[in-house]
């Protein structure tokens, strides 16, 4: 009964404690369940649709080679295919789009990389113009079964009829070549009858793409080595595992990102919540000193009294945990649903991650119990009679502030505030720390917004300065450069050469695009996180810092470059420098050096263009009809794609985080003010009796709170920055690195939330202050 | 004394409040005058209504019925802010538990009040009046109970209030210390001419008063005049 009454009496504080716990638990549950569900959905998808383990492209090999590939020890299943890049003419799209046409068997399901049919039907045997299109491409271009699109198949224009919309585990992310982000309008995957695809590409009885799955216990590097050996005479471009598979890489990074979100961020939140819980409960119990003494005087055992307050703490935690669990599961499921739509998984498996949730609740409960227990024990250590007496007047002494030359001019109110803080430095420190943590987690929430904005600025303003990137089907000789420059609307054209290579250093290796940029390049620059452009060295390669880390190289080392096209040259190149680019893994050379490496005259893979925007439609129309042009990508489309992928997935979590951080901030500040009121109520009532107005009394109490809040803000900035540095260190993926950036706006935001919370708490406490029962406070001694 | 001006004039005062389902009648139909410069002792057992009466006179509480006039001002018509102003300008309080601000020195505790009063004494002078001139910079925790109560009295008289209201000022003190505190109250009344009301359940204190008002069950049951005020040193209990 007393427990219920106490809970009711202190409902404001219990509510605030429960909210802090709820937020801590909810962040854990939301992020963790979203992460675990995403990982589970991915693995389930891969398993059910038989996603391959090893992939390879080649020029052309006879079907008979398939049997020899299948005979490689450790290979479980082999799928040989025809894959072709085609230019598409999509209704309603001004520029040409790029299609990846994949041949699939007409009558049976693919052995590996099976398709999930979303709408429409499978290909019908004998109907050679039928295709299935990927859902992302279909949606981006509003295509549906029954629609037709134009395609140039090996120089011949053909009309393709869409009969179905499909998903493939190979193309969860549909990314073309060296792009970083999907552009679903201009790049799509289409599946067509293998029999229909053979003749136009002169691939009857042959294949140019192979995927295979590994038997349990097989060694991937060994299989890759043997496969490369088999494919080499047939123009093999180097086999690679899932690690180097673009879509897999991308989604795995995203899942890993969620894991960090589901680990570090909730750890920070939970840690902060636990700390606050501890502080709040220990202060709350301390204000109950006299009650505890009375119970003890009545003969209650220490254990029973301790049990009461622990029960009190546990009830608050239980309410919070229940709320947090419900909110977290709900939010986690919503976020997971969004991810599944976003990643186009055909399966949705929600897994709440019970162990972590249990741990989160356990940590909250322990923090609360420790806080309550510490305070109860301090009171129980006193003899009942002593505890029932009013606490002796607290010991104060004049500090340096009063002895300073300002001392005599300090008003009494300032002295009271100052001495109260100086007398309880630990308590004041904890109170400051609590608010500082609130500021810090608000910064953590905002950090992702800032980081994504910086990545955006660096990549799409400083690095990429072209309007349009044109990609040729095959590298063209240098006169193509002039041809492109004279196209309508082109203001500036800068060619580039890019070749797929495998970089090796000691035991490490990585497939990356190797870019050759012409001297004096301006439209594409090599820029580090500091925003400063790096100059290319005449004889060395510049690597993305992350790539350098993967390979374990430092400037001056010599890496082996294995070109995965043409003559497949193998060379050693000096690492001239590392640049901390924020996106992707790249290697840069001067175009001349690359040409020498490739043993070719100057040829170009494409060009970066600066375009007169008014003539863009005209340019697109021309590009669409140029047989040499495989496709054109606009920077604005990439920017949009970046915003829709990375930025959006961050935005979802960021808003959840900021929401919870705000609630925690409010709860902490409210509780601090509320407890200060119960600790100082008697003193304040005395002042009211002496004729101090409500305003004057409020200034005393709230002035102290304001001072604490002011002290907490810079500390919170420092702690928040440390948290963000931790997160930035954890977010060093191959696809992107998160820079440690916190803008002024974010600081202003954090401070505004804290000040708003302080103002709201002030109002509530002030209201209570106005209603102080002066007579009652004077009669009771505590 | 009877010809002196009445500082307080209470008529038909009643106060009742509800505790759970029980209505407590703390005061019933009380008429009372306090005259300028006199020292009154309100005597009665606990629950007799003396504290309630004092709180109403001091503007800490409002009556359920009746009127209280302070000089020519009707306190019962005041809103809480006006009552705060009344306490600030006209009333000095002394309580059983001193109610000093622990974070301020003796001088600062007094200064707290003199800073907001208009015709205040110098805090050091007020503390000299109560014999604490050598304890100015001591914090409450460094003072004995009697010394703390004397600081409270200095604080109450320093603003030169019209009336000094003392609620069981010796309740928490031993005999000698209590006597010393009463001496200080008596001296303030005598030297500053402050109208003073002392509440106590200790009948021995009645001897120092000009008038003794006895209360029981919320009513005034007897009012007596002392022929001669005894000095606190002559009291014993």
Image (cartoon, helix red, strand yellow):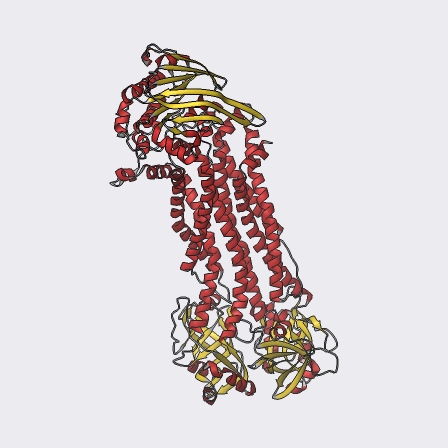
Q: Nearer the viewer, residue A447 or A562?
A: A447
Kindly identify the residue that appears in the image at 49 percent across and 36 percent down: A284
Q: How many marks?
A: 0
Can see residue A275? no
- Where is residue A386 shown, x and y percent of the image? 45, 24
Can see residue A514? yes
Kindly identify the residue that appears in the image at 26 percent across and 30 percent down: B122
Q: In the rendered image, which quarter is residue A166 located in?
A: bottom right
Q: Is residue A552 above or below residue A260?
A: below
Q: Nearer the viewer, residue A356 or A504?
A: A356
- Where is residue B73 shown, x and y percent of the image? 38, 29
- Where is residue B45 shown, x and y percent of the image? 47, 16
Q: Nearer the viewer, residue A772 or A139?
A: A772
Q: In the rendered image, which quarter is residue A183 located in?
A: bottom right
Q: Is residue A233 left or right of residue A104?
A: left
Quadrant showing the N terminus of chain A: top right
Q: Nearer the viewer, residue A180 or A290?
A: A290
- Where is residue A519 shown, x and y percent of the image? 39, 81
Q: In the rendered image, which quarter is residue A89 located in?
A: bottom right
Q: Is residue A336 left or right of residue A396?
A: right
Q: Is residue B26 above or below residue B101?
A: above
């Amino acid at each position: 009964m007393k427990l219920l009454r106490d809970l009711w009496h202190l409902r404001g504080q219990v509510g605030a404690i429960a909210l802090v716990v709820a937020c801590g638990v909810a962040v854990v549950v939301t992020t963790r369940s979203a992460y675990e569900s995403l990982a589970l959905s991915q693995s389930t998808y891969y398993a059910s649709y038989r996603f391959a383990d090893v992939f390879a492209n080649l020029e052309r090999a006879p079907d008979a080679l398939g049997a020899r590939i299948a005979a490689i020890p450790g290979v479980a299943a082999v799928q040989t295919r025809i894959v072709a890049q085609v230019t598409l003419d999509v209704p309603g799209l001004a520029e040409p789009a790029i299609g990846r046409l994949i041949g699939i068997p007409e009558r049976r399901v693919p052995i590996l990389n099976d398709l999930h049919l979303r709408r429409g039907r499978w290909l019908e045997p004998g109907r050679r113009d039928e295709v299935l299109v990927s859902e992302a491409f279909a949606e981006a271009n509003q295509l549906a079964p029954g629609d037709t699109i134009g395609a140039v198949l090996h120089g011949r224009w053909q009309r393709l009829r869409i009969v179905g919309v499909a998903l493939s585990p190979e193309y969860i992310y549909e990314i073309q070549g060296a792009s970083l982000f999907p552009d679903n309008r201009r790049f799509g995957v289409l599946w067509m009858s293998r029999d229909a695809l053979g003749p136009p590409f002169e691939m009857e009885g042959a294949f140019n793409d192979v995927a295979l799955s590994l038997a349990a216990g097989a060694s991937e590097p060994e299989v890759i080595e043997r496969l490369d050996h088999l494919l080499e005479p047939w123009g093999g471009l180097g086999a690679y595992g899932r690690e180097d598979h673009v879509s897999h890489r991308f989604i795995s990074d995203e899942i890993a990102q969620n894991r960090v979100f589901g680990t570090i961020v909730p750890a920070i939140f939970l840690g902060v919540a636990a700390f606050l819980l501890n502080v709040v409960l220990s202060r709350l119990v301390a204000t109950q000193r006299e009650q505890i003494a009375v119970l003890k005087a009545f003969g209650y055992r220490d254990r029973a009294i301790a049990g009461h307050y622990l029960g009190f703490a546990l009830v608050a935690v239980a309410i919070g945990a229940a709320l947090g669990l419900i909110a977290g599961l709900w939010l986690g499921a919503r976020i997971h649903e969004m991810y599944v739509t976003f990643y186009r998984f055909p399966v949705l498996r929600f897994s709440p991650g019970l162990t972590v949730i249990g741990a989160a609740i356990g940590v909250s409960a322990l923090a609360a119990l420790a806080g309550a227990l510490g305070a109860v024990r301090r009171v129980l250590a006193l003899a009942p009679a002593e505890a029932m007496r009013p606490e002796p007047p607290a010991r104060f002494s004049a500090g340096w502030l009063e002895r300073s030359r300002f001392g005599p001019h300090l008003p009494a109110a300032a002295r009271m505030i100052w001495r109260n803080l100086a007398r309880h430095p630990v308590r004041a420190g904890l109170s400051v720390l609590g608010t500082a943590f609130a500021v810090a987690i608000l910064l953590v929430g905002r950090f992702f917004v800032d980081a994504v904005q910086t990545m955006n600025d660096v990549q799409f303003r400083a690095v990429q300065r072209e309007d349009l990137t044109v990609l040729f089907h095959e590298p063209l000789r240098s006169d193509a450069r002039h041809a492109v420059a004279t196209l309508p609307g082109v203001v500036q054209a800068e060619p580039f050469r890019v070749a797929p290579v495998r970089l090796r250093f000691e035991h490490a290796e990585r497939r990356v695009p190797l870019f050759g940029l012409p001297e004096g390049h301006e439209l594409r620059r090599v820029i580090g996180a500091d925003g400063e452009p790096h100059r290319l060295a005449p004889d060395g390669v510049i690597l993305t810092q992350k790539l350098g880390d993967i390979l374990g190289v430092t400037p001056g080392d010599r890496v082996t470059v294995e070109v995965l096209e043409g003559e497949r040259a193998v060379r050693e190149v000096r690492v001239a420098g590392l640049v901390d680019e924020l996106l992707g893994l790249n290697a840069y050379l001067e175009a001349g050096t690359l040409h020498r490496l490739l043993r070719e005259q100057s040829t170009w893979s494409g060009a970066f263009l600066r375009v007169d925007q008014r003539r863009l439609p005209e340019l697109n129309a021309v590009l669409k009809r140029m047989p040499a042009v495989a496709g054109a990508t606009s920077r604005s489309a990439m920017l949009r794609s970046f915003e829709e992928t990375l930025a959006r997935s961050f935005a979802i979590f960021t808003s959840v985080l900021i929401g919870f951080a705000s609630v925690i901030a409010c709860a902490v500040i409210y509780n601090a003010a509320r407890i200060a009121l119960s600790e100082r109520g008697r003193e304040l009532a005395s002042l009211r009796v002496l004729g101090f107005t409500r305003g004057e009394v409020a200034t005393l109490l709230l002035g102290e709170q304001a001072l604490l809040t002011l002290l907490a803000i810079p500390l919170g900035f420092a702690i928040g920055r440390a948290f963000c540095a931790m997160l930035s260190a954890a977010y060093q993926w191959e696809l992107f690195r998160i820079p440690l950036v916190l803008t002024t706006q974010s600081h202003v935001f954090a401070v505004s939330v804290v000040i708003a919370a302080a103002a709201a708490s002030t109002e509530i406490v002030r209201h209570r202050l106005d209603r102080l029962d002066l007579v009652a406070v004077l009669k009771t001694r505590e | 004394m009877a010809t002196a001006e009445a500082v307080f004039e209470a008529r038909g005062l009643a106060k009742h409040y509800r505790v759970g389902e029980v209505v407590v009648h703390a005061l019933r139909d009380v008429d009372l005058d306090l005259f300028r410069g006199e020292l009154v002792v309100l005597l009665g057992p606990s629950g007799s209504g003396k504290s309630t009466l004092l709180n109403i006179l001091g503007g800490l509480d409002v009556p359920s019925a009746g009127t209280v006039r302070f000089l020519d001002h009707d306190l019962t018509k005041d809103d809480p802010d006006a009552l705060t102003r009344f306490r600030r300008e006209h009333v000095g309080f002394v309580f059983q538990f001193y109610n000093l601000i622990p974070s301020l020195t003796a001088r600062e505790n007094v200064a707290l009040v003199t800073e907001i009063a208009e015709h205040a004494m110098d805090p050091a002078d007020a503390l000299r009046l109560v014999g604490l001139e050598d304890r100015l910079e001591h914090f409450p925790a460094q003072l004995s109970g009697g010394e703390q109560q004397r600081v409270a009295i200095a604080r109450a008289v320093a603003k030169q209030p019209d009336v000094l209201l003392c609620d069981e000022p010796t309740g928490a003190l031993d005999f000698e210390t209590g006597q010393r505190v009463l001496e200080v109250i008596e001296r303030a009344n005598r030297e500053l001419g402050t109208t003073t009301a002392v509440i106590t359940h200790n009948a021995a204190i009645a001897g120092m008063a000009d008038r003794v008002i006895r209360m029981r069950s919320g009513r005034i049951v007897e009012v007596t005049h002392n022929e001669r005020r005894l000095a606190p040193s002559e009291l014993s209990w």
